[in-house]
Amino acid sequence: MRTEVHMCSIPYDPSRDALNSPQLRPAVFTAGSNYEIDGLCAEFARLAYIRYEQGGAELQRLEQALALVGFESAVPFNNADDDTHGFGAVRRSDGLAVLAFRGTEPQSLTDIATDLEISMTKWTESAGQVHAGFAGAARGLREAVGNWLNETAPTRRQLILTGHSLGAAIATLFASLCTPNALVTFGSPRVGDATFVATLGPVGIRRYVDCCDLVTDLPPPIGGYVHAGASNYITREGKLAPHADDAFVQADRAAAREGYLLQYAWRIGDVMVRDLADHAPINYVRSLVP
C-alpha cells in the first residue's frame, strides 16, 4: 500500500512535557501562511490545553495564536464542576467557525475519573448508548456551546468540531447535536455504540490515529463500543496512510516500538513507551502542519 508523502518540519517529540503539558509549546502557526482544515484542527486541539479559563495572559496567548491564522478572538467554555473546557472561534474573512475541546490533563483527577467512567448511558440527545463519563462532560458545556452557536450563526459559513483525546470524545458527542460540516479528531477513544455512530452519518468524519497511540484502542471494543469514522493512520515516520490495512499497521507499530526502545525510552525526560508518546498532541500536529 502507498502512504502520502509529507515532510515533517516539526521533529517527533517523545518528551513527557509534550504528553503531559502540551500547552507549554509555542504556537506552530506562521503569520501569513495558509493551512488545510485538518492542520488547523490539529493545532487548535493542542491549543485547547492552554489555561485560557484563567483569563488574562493565558487567554491572550490563545488569541494571539489564533490571530496568526486570521481568527479575531476566542470564546472559552468552562465547566469548573467537572473541569471540562473548550473554545469557539470564527474567522470572519471566510466564515470558518471552529469548536475545539480540551483533552485529558494527567494532573486532573476529575479528567481521569471522567475517562474511567466507562459504563454506557443513553444519549437521549440523539440516539444510542455512549460512554457515561464523556456524556457528562459534554452535557456540562452544552448550554454555553449552544449559546455560542446561536450567536455566531449569522456570520458562520462552515462549522468544524475538533479535539484531542477526551476533547475528541466531547467533539464527537457535540457532532450528533449540531451536525457540523466536519468532525476532525486526534487520538480519539471509542465514544459509543453503533446506534450512536449512525447518528453521525451526515457528518464528514476524519479520525486520526498516530501510530501506536494506545488511547485510540480504548475503551476496548466490548459491550457495544465502536469507533466513529474510519482510521486515518499516521506512520512511525509521521506520514499519512489513510488506507492502511491491518497488516501494514501491525508491522509499522512493531518497528516503531523497537526503534523507540533503542532511541528514546532510556532518556531522562522522555516517555518510557511509544504507545503513550504517540498520544502527545504535537505528534499529530507534526504530521498535518507543514
Image (spheres, grey):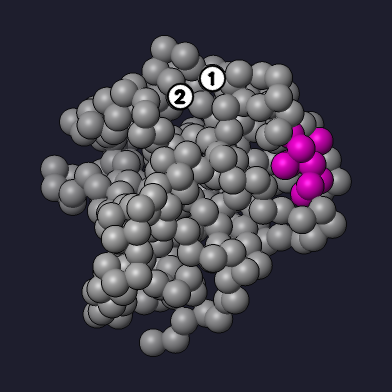
Query: Residue flagged by tag 1: what amino acid is it?
Result: Asn
Snapshot quadrant of residue 71: top right
- In the image, which disc is placed on residue 84? 2
Snapshot quadrant of residue 72: top right
Which numbered disc, 2 or 1, marks the residue that appears first in the sequence? Answer: 1
Asked if the residues shown at circle 2 and circle 1 are in contact, with their CB atoms under 8 angstroms apart, the answer is yes
Residue at 58 percent of width and 71 percent of height = 8
* Rendering coords of residue 22 (x, y %): 51, 43
> 10 Å neighbourhood of mark 2: few (<14), some, or many (≥20)?
many
Locate the C terminus by quadrant. bottom right
Residue at numbered disc 1: 78
Query: Residue flagged by tag 2: what amino acid is it?
Result: Thr
Horizontal relation, residue 108 to residue 147: left or right: left
Residue at 77 percent of width and 61 percent of height = 34
* Rendering coords of residue 132 (x, y %): 27, 28
Horizontal relation, residue 21 to residue 98: left or right: left
Q: Which residues are magenta?
A: 63-72
Q: Could you tell me if residue 32 is visible in this image?
A: yes
Horizontal relation, residue 225 to residue 231: left or right: left
